[in-house]
Amino acid sequence: MDTMDKTYDPSFEKRIYDFWMKGKYFEAHPNSEKEPFTVMMPPPNITGQLHMGHALNQTVQDIIVRFKRMSGFETLWLPGTDHASIATEVKIVEQMKKEEGLTKADVGREGFLERAWAWKDKFGGRIVEQLKRLGTSCDWSKEAFTMDKNCSAAVLDAFVRYYKKGLIYRGDRIINWCPHCRTALSDAEVEYREQQSNLWYYRYPFVEGDGYITIATTRPETMLGDTAVAVNPKDEKMAPYVGRMLRLPLTDRIIPVVADDYVEMGFGTGAVKITPAHDPNDFELGLRHNLEVIRVIDDGGIMNENAGKYAGLDRLACRKAVVEDLEKQGYLEKIEPYAHNVGECYRCGETVEAIVSKQWFVRMKPLAEPAIKAVRSKKVEFIPKRFEKTYFNWMENIKDWCISRQLWWGHRIPAYYCDDCGEMTVAKTAPECCPKCGGHLRQDEDVLDTWFSSALWPFSTLGYPRKNKNLSYFYPTSVLVTAYDIIFFWVARMIFSGMEIMGEPPFSEVLIHGIVRDPHGKKMSKSAGNGVDPLELIDRYGADALRFSLATGIAPGSDTRFTEGKIESCRNFVNKLWNASRFVVMNIEKDDDLTFPAKLNGADKWILTRLNDVVKDVTINLNKYEIGLAAARLYDFTWTEFCDWYIEMSKPLLYGGNKKDHSHAVAMLTYVLTAILKLLHPFIPFVTEEIYSKFAPKGSVLMVSDWPAYNKKTVFRKEERQFESLRETVVAIRNMRAEMNVPPSKKVDAFVVTDNAPFVAGVAGYLEKLAGLSSVTVVGGKDEVQGAVASVVTALAEVLVPLGELIDTDKERERLQKDIAATAADVDRLGKLLGNAAFVAKAPQKLVDGEREKLARAEEKLAKLKEKLAALGD
RNA sequence: GGAGGCUUAGCUCAGUUGGUCAGAGCACUUGCCUUACAAGCAAGGGGUCAUCGGUUCAAGUCCGGUAGCCUCCACCA
């Protein structure tokens, strides 16, 4: 047999992964014999370096996928990467500046795209290699990229379809603008952060007569674009002013006072300056009142020519200047400190400006409706369920989606404008010339929001819009696994896209997991510098240990903290499994018969019963995506029951010198170990495959073997109970030994009084081995044992141990008194419970009977213990 | 302003449908290099399950109030 090193060393991981790849075990094919199980990998950005969030996401998916594959599904896990339009473009711009000293304008669109594709080749490939190190069992032959041929075709198809249905339109709207990235952003791409600022109070004088209206603002610089002041129509104090004209300070503009419900009466001064070009609410109000829209801030965040003498100033510099000038000219009333939320670009952190601009939008209301219905009707289910609320809340209040970006890296919008007649044509392939006048066409300069292509991911990766076998067999997919932070960006958009384009939802379940936090509960981030590098952890502990540490103790939807201690204890667990396996493998002899024994002994029946329960629990929990529970159950069974008890119990057979016994023990050990390896394989795939190869038949591959099934024929409840009481007895004897300071090396004789003498006689060998006894003698009564004894009372037996000079009467008395106190408390509690007529009448009979039995046992034990104590004398 | 979550041993957290659920890992105490494993073995200590009230024969477990912490959404100048 193969040999194994004494200490687990994960350096074989790479070899195992290559072995799987060579065997093409990850690949899935349309297979009408089998039921499909499909998972679409959330594509990592090509900007990235693998982080702990990826590691968790990948681990959860791989556990599910490996479990399903072993359970007999044709399992496709489709991997890929995302071009991440804005995120990547920001990085490339930075790199270009640093390395070449060039800007986008310097290299032009083509030159820029060349660099972008080079970036993709370099970093897209790197993240794939990093994913592989985690052991991800995805079908790399189907690897996709959001800008590859398939996905791009899907994007064009979707865009044109939406457009033809009137679901996409182009128009002047107020949008979020990042002055640094110089592009529009969707609402979801703006993050709000509270900032300490001021509320400035200014007086706008009436044109006619004396007096003024005081307005309050957080953004004095935008006053240069004010075109009205608004008050609430119900505000009696303000009513007389409605319709009057004001002279806008610092400008020569005359603006009206209008009445609108938008203005809240109790807030500020009750009058609001209105800047339609630079505030979403003001823009809406402006539309209602037909106000002029005057832009004063340009695309770079600089004041434009409409700002008069302030033109050319950065918006913050302009604020300072405006504030000074207004004060100098006597318009300032007061300044109050004020905390408010400021929107920032989710990619570069720059303060976002609201500006009016011509952009492309997706009309969301008609798309949201079927998407809401899909979840309401349970065609799509969120796990855990509470995230449906988040989803509904967003979908029901959704606004149109701004999808054009003033970027170069991405899917260019398939709209063409005629230089001659100005006609716009939207088409999948660029027309030769203007269909209307034959004039020259120019394609729209903008690209699409990166999430537009991500939204099509579940079917674009399967070849849509081409009709093909993969698409019809694997779509809709089974479960989508992702963290809660991209429900809006991605999950919601995939659902409405799937509904609209494919006519059915893209997946039936959405498994939401939490995010990985640092040991203090803080979000891991580059800027905070508290991130840990999964690759470094893999180097130090192995991918299996990392995976197990991420899988254990997690619950759907809940965040998890990562600590070094956790991965260490998981590595120790892997090492434990390694050594237990090593023990089994090193005991296999050439002529051992490894077939499952025809005759099982008590210990076999016990471990098989326990194993069946584990198979059942783990299978149920994995089907429910309760990965943390499944992992904990396996950890416990492997370490405690298999290693600490069953292996120990197998030693007398292995070392007894009897060939038949040896063979029997090895056959059972390999049987149980094989089941454990299969059950653990989804969690720790490398080490289980490696161990399996040490003793499995040639050509047998664990990752494609069958998942263990619950087998009623190997469930033995009677033996299970008997061995549980044997364990209890062993622990009680060990406890006694420890408290009496009997050294582990000291073997002692034991006399046993029991009403199940045959069983005790049968397990005497186990008692000797496990409790450090030199002999076990079944006796008829305690009178047969002479001299001072230490005694142990369990459900199985009364064990009397003559310790001779080791006996310490005081300690023995103390022990017995402690045991008596605990048992008496049990008797008391159970007596009260059973004395409660309502409990006996209403609780299930089985429970009542069980409690009665317990009471009887406890009473019996208590009596025996008291006898012992009395026999000790004072 | 709206929604959701969390509060269980010193620390990090499990506890799925109410009845051996009061647990695990780490830490701690004691004793062990027992021929698979010191990344180990054996034994042990430690929690009125945030708080108040309700439902129930029975509540970390269901319902409501309170306190503290956290997250998301909205963005009233």
Image (cartoon, helix red, strand yellow):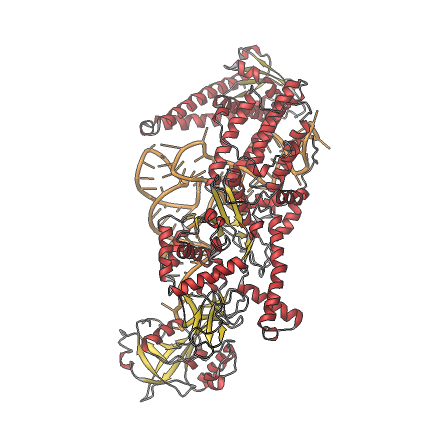
Q: Is residue A601 left or right of residue A471?
A: right
The quadrant of the picture occupied by the N terminus of chain A is: top right
What residue is at 58 percent from the left and 54 percent from the top? A51
Q: How many marks?
A: 0
- Whether residue A855 can be seen here: yes
The quadrant of the picture occupied by the C terminus of chain A is: top right
Q: Position of residue A102 (x, y in %)?
A: 63, 73
Q: Which residue is at the front of the view, A65 or A626?
A: A65
Q: Can you say whether A355 is above or below A72 in the image?
A: below
Q: Position of residue A734 (x, y in %)?
A: 59, 25
Q: Is residue B66 left or right of residue B26?
A: left
Q: Can you say whether A188 is above or below A664 in the image?
A: below
Q: Can you say whether A800 is above or below A172 in the image?
A: above
Q: Is residue A788 left or right of residue A175?
A: right
Q: Which residue is at the front of the view, A267 or A537?
A: A537
* Quarter of the rendering containing residue A161: bottom left
Q: Is residue A360 left or right of residue A108?
A: left
- Whether residue A557 can be seen here: no
Q: Position of residue A620 (x, y in %)?
A: 46, 37
Q: Which residue is at the front of the view, A17 or A312?
A: A17
Q: Position of residue A530 (x, y in %)?
A: 59, 56
Q: Can you say whether A757 is above or below A298 in the image?
A: above
